[in-house]
């Protein structure tokens, strides 16, 4: 019988590092920030760093990272890099894509 359990954060990971690209203080941007913080607190406790980048203030960063839709989350560490587009409202699905929990 298979049981879907929360995955343990690997001991070798010092910090999970995320960059969240948003467009100003739009409702979707604010929702993405709130949802990501919920996901991280639930799965990583304090073992993460989050940098929020507002592309209205710094559009060159979006070009460098090839961001074509907002909000976009990039998990930089642990590698490999992962990207999630949207406001992360499907918390469990977003956590699974980021490999924080076992997903279906």
Image (cartoon, rainbow, N blue to C red):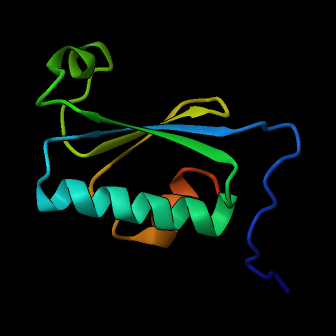
Q: Is residue 56 above or below residue 103?
A: above
Please name the residue shown 11% across and 55% down the image. Answer: 26
Q: Does the rendering let one see residue 99?
A: yes
The residue lying toward the viewer, choosing from 24 and 92, is 24
Please name the residue shown 57% across and 59% down the image. Answer: 40
For the C terminus, the quadrant is bottom right
Q: Is residue 80 above or below residue 88?
A: above
The residue lying toward the viewer, choosing from 46 and 67, is 46
Q: Position of residue 49 (x, y in %)?
A: 57, 40
Counting labels gives 0
Would you identify the image quadrant in which residue 14 lies? Answer: top right
In this rendering, position of residue 57 left or right of residue 103: left
Q: Position of residue 62 (x, y in %)?
A: 23, 23
In this rendering, position of residue 39 left or right of residue 43: left
**Which residue is at the far bottom?**
1
For the N terminus, the quadrant is bottom right
Please name the residue shown 79% across and 38% down the image. Answer: 13
In this rendering, position of residue 92 left or right of residue 51: right
């Amino acid at each position: 019988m298979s049981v879907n359990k929360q995955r343990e954060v690997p001991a070798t990971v010092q910090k999970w590092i995320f960059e969240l690209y948003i467009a100003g203080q739009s409702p979707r941007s604010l929702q993405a920030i709130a949802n990501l913080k919920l996901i991280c607190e639930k799965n990583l406790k304090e073992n993460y760093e989050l940098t929020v980048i507002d592309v209205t203030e710094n559009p060159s960063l979006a070009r460098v990272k090839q961001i074509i839709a907002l909000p976009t989350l990039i998990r930089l560490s642990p590698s490999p890099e992962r990207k999630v587009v949207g406001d992360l409202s499907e918390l469990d699905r977003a956590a699974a894509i980021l490999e924080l929990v076992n997903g279906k």
